[in-house]
Image: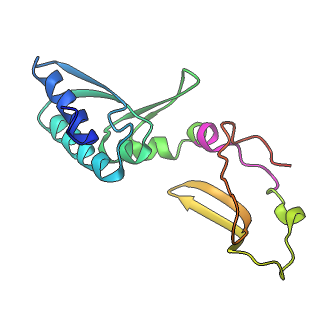
Amino acid sequence: MKDLPYGTRRMVEIARALGSEPGLLLLDEPAAGMNSVEMQESARQISALRDRGYTIVLIEHRMDMMMSIADRIVVLDHGQKIAEGTPAEVLSHPAVIEAYLGKPTDRACDFRRATVPESTPTLLRLYNVSVRYAPMELLHRLSLILPPAGFSYWLWASAPSTPCT
C-alpha cells in the first residue's frame, strides 16, 4: 500500500472501515495532506457513501471540502459549540466569522507608516486591497510592498482579532 498515492491510501483506509458494515462512519480529517485534486476526489467518494445511506461524522479543517459535501455543520471554537446549521447558515454566522476571521474593528490597519519611496525598485505594490469570500471579508484594505529580491513571508495570526499597530 505504501506505493499508492497518498489520496488513494486514505480512500483504502475508508474502504477497510466499510468492510465491517458500520452504522456510523467517523472520519477524522480525511483530506489532511491531500492536494486539491485528491481532496476533490475524496469529497466525491465521501458524498457517494452518504448518498448510499451511510451516516458520516466528518472532522475536517478544509472548509472548501466541508461546504461541498456537508448537510449540516457544527462549528467548535476552543471546544465550545458556537454554531450549527447548513453550510450557508454556518458560513454567515457572526460567531463563526468572529472566531475564524476576527472582530471587525472601527479602524483599518494603517500601513502607510511603512511606505517605500516610489523610486525604490519593487516586484509588487498593493494598496488598500479588500477581498471577500461569500459573506466574509478576508482582507481589509491590505497594503503590501514586495522587493524584487529577498525573503517575504505571510503571517496568519492565530488570534486574528488582535489589533495591528
The magenta span reads 97-107
122 to the left or right of 107: left
| Image location of residue 142, percent across then percent down | 71, 62
- Residue nearer the viewer, 162 or 115: 115
Above or below residue 154? Residue 56 is above
Q: Position of residue 15 (x, y in %)?
A: 14, 29
Q: Would you place residue 3 above or below residue 68 in this image?
A: above
Count of labels in the image: 0
- At which x and y percent is residue 7? 26, 41
> Observer-nearest residue: 67 or 120?
120
Residue furthest bottom as drawn: 119
Residue furthest right in the image? 113
Name the image quarter holding residue 146. bottom right
Q: Nearer the viewer, residue 22 or 15?
A: 15
Q: Which residue is drawn at the image coordinates 87% and 76% (left, top)?
A: 117
Residue at position x 67%, y 53% from top?
153
Relative to residue 162, is residue 137 drawn left or right?
Answer: left
Please name the colour scheme applied to the rendered image.
Answer: rainbow
Q: Is residue 162 left or right of residue 36?
A: right
Q: Nearer the viewer, residue 120 or 59?
A: 120
Q: Is residue 9 magenta?
A: no
Quarter of the image for the N terminus: give it: top left
Residue located 77% across and 78% down the image: 121
Q: Quadrant for residue 5, please give it.
A: top left
Identify the residue shown where x is 40% and y is 48%. 64
